[in-house]
Image: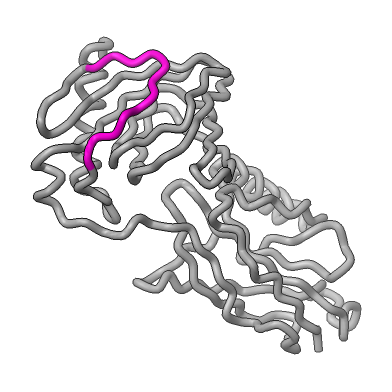
């Protein structure tokens, strides 16, 4: 496929994704957007389509975007600073379409190589004709166990969460005082239903030696991570299951500052 055909296909994919994306926030007027190297491919009353190029280190001052779909031709990483000063990094994967709610931020392309993206911004009457929804916010809560509960060596942990696309929810436990943490459930957990309910089987200690950690104090933590950290944790789990030994890992930082979970539940083993 030559370049012009590829761009045309990307425009079609991005526009379709925007029309079908759940949780779309529409109806916002076009904002002034800071661009490094952008070529306008289409601009009318309904949409503006831009092809953007970034070199590693390219950055922009605080600016705003309307609801958009972004098609990534290349892989790499952005660093964003929100209007309230929070900083987060987000990985993008080549040949993927990403939905973005209206946002105000400053941005920097971290590379490692030149980034190339197709951006489809919705505006005009097409925005007004579509229903509006609340912008999805990242949120995680643990509802079971509660602080101070006494738990068996294996129990279900429960909670609620709203996790943005491209992010992943993991539940971790460890015996209080240890540096390492152990991911639970064998993989990232997926919130379900309108309330984002999740359930994960959790082990508090070594099930091969139940008496070892009897009466010990454990902590349980919910963490939301990006694709790279998701891959790292999944690789650790697969490697550990293959070897039959679980050395634990350093607790990963929550990637999205808005997801910082205030719950750090401390429980006691029976």
Q: Residue at x 53, y 26 (%)?
A: 108
| Residue 84 location (% of width, % of height) | 53, 47
Q: Is the magenta stretch mostly helix, strand or loop?
A: loop
Residue 150 can be seen in this image = yes
Location of residue 149 with respect to 121 vertically, above or below: below
Residue 187 can be seen in this image = no
Q: Which residue is drawn at 33% across and 16% down?
A: 38
- Residue 124 lies left or right of residue 102; in this view the side is left
- Residue 186 lies left or right of residue 114; in this view the side is right
Quadrant for the C terminus in the image = bottom right
Q: Which residue is drawn at 55% across and 59% down?
A: 169
Q: Which of 251 and 104 is in front in this view?
A: 104
Q: Does the magenta stretch include residue 119?
A: no
| Residue 123 location (% of width, % of height) | 18, 37
Location of residue 221 with respect to 231 vertically, above or below: below
| Residue 194 location (% of width, % of height) | 35, 72
Q: Which of 225 and 270 is in front in this view?
A: 225
Quadrant for the N terminus in the image = top left
| Residue 252 location (% of width, % of height) | 69, 51
- Residue 94 lies left or right of residue 184; in this view the side is left
Q: Nearer the viewer, residue 171 or 140?
A: 140
Q: Residue at x 88, y 78 (%)?
A: 213
Q: Is residue 34 magenta?
A: yes
Q: Give the range drawn in magenta.
A: 29-40
Location of residue 62 with respect to 183 vertically, above or below: above
């Amino acid at each position: 496929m030559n370049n012009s055909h590829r761009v045309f296909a990307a425009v079609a994919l991005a526009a379709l994704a925007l029309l079908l994306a759940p949780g779309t926030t529409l109806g916002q007027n076009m904002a002034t957007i800071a661009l490094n190297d952008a070529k306008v491919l289409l601009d009318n009353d309904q949409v503006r389509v831009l092809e953007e190029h970034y070199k590693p280190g390219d950055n922009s001052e605080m600016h705003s975007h309307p609801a958009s779909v972004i098609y990534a031709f290349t892989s790499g990483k952005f660093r964003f600073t929100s209007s309230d000063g929070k900083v987060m990094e987000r990985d993008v994967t080549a040949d993927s379409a990403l939905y973005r709610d209206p946002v105000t931020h400053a941005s920097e392309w971290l590379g490692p190589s030149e980034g190339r993206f197709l951006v489809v911004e919705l505006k005009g009457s097409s925005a007004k004709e579509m229903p509006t929804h609340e912008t999805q916010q990242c949120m995680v809560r643990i509802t079971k166990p509660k602080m101070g509960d006494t738990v068996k060596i294996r129990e279900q942990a429960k909670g609620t969460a709203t996790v943005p696309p491209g992010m992943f929810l993991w539940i971790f436990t460890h015996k209080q005082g240890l540096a390492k943490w152990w991911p639970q459930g064998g993989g990232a957990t997926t919130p379900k239903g309108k309330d984002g309910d999740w359930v994960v089987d959790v082990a508090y200690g070594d099930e091969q030696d139940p008496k070892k950690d009897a009466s010990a104090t454990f902590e349980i933590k919910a963490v939301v991570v990006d694709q790279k950290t998701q891959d790292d944790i999944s690789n650790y789990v697969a490697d550990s299951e293959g070897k039959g030994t679980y050395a634990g890992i350093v607790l990963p930082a929550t990637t999205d500052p808005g997801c910082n979970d205030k719950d750090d539940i401390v429980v006691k083993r029976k």
